[in-house]
Image (cartoon, rainbow, N blue to C red):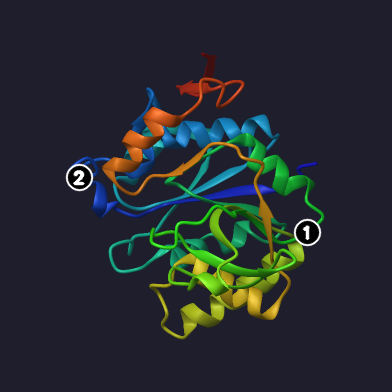
């Protein structure tokens, strides 16, 4: 089912809206119910059979390395203060070529979302939620029969089909097309695009679909209120198994 997908996690950003909590800590190492965001992500991936992980680091990246050891390949975005997520993804282009799962490091999500992507008939797809708050900071999408037409943060009610959550899946062919698009934008001096904006450009040229998740818990952690909401709403059976990774040894908790 996994088709040798790698997971590429983007974790370079500083998380300014969570200061001072992220002054000396990357956002993905913030804890909810005693576990880091990154632990939840790795557990979801491993449960779905994906163990080949690449993490693009930046702010306090050494702390992520110390936390994970050799659990992942690390790439450094040295320009994380002046670039955005599409630049971080471009840095990982050599690891995308056989197909990959894309993940933002600030997203807590169920393993079921990974499995929904993997079993989807669509080669290139992203998890969406049709319960939409037009006024939040999430990217929104307009779809026709699940085919994404465009994605943006500001979409009026008539053109909004769903919120874009992630993770996303790209096939080998899709990854090749995406790399070409990233090359075009980066070589043109566009270093500050969000990845979801690049995915919107991708959808204009190629087939890209939204896969509606089955109601599983998720939370994007951008602000302190998000941490509080996740801590309050995360169900006790959120994951069947959470791996606590200490010195590369998995302890079942």
Give the residue pinned by disc 2. 23
Percent position of residue 68, x then y: 45, 32
User: Which residue is most to the front?
Assistant: 158
Q: Nearer the viewer, residue 19 or 152?
A: 152
Residue mark closest to the camera, 2 vs 1 = 1
Q: Residue at x 69, y 54 (%)?
A: 211
Mark 2, residues whose alpha carbon is within 10 Å: few (<14), some, or many (≥20)?
A: some
Q: Residue at x 48, y 72 (%)?
A: 155
In the rendered image, residue 71, in percent from the top left (x then y), is placed at 53, 34
Residue at far left of view: 20
**Label drawn at residue 122:** 1
168 sits to left or right of 235: right
The mark that comes first in sequence, 2 or 1, is: 2
Helix, strand or loop under label 2: loop
Q: Is residue 99 above or below residue 73?
A: below
In this view, the residue in front, 98 or 49, is 49
């Amino acid at each position: 089912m996994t088709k040798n997908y790698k997971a590429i996690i983007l974790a370079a950003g500083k998380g300014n809206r969570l200061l001072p909590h992220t002054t000396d800590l990357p956002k993905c190492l913030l804890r909810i119910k005693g576990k880091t965001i990154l632990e939840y992500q790795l557990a979801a991936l491993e449960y779905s059979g994906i163990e080949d992980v690449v993490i693009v680091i930046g702010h306090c990246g050494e702390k992520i390395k110390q936390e994970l050891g050799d659990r992942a390949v690390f790439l450094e975005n040295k320009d994380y203060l002046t670039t955005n997520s599409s630049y971080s993804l471009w840095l990982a282009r050599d690891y995308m070529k056989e197909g990959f799962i894309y993940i933002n490091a600030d997203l807590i999500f169920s393993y079921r979302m990974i499995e929904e992507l993997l079993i989807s008939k669509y080669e290139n797809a992203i998890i969406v939620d049709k319960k939409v708050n037009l006024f939040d900071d999430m990217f929104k999408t307009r779809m026709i029969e699940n085919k994404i037409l465009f994605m943006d943060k500001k979409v009026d009610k008539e053109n909004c089909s769903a919120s874009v959550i992630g993770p996303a899946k790209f096939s080998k062919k899709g990854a090749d097309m995406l790399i070409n698009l990233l090359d075009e934008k980066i070589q043109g001096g566009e270093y500050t695009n969000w990845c979801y904006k690049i995915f919107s450009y991708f959808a204009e040229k190629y087939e890209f679909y939204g896969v509606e998740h089955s109601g599983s818990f998720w939370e994007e952690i951008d602000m302190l209120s998000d941490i509080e909401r996740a801590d309050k709403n995360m169900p006790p059976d959120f994951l069947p198994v959470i791996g606590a990774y200490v010195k590369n040894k998995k302890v079942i908790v």
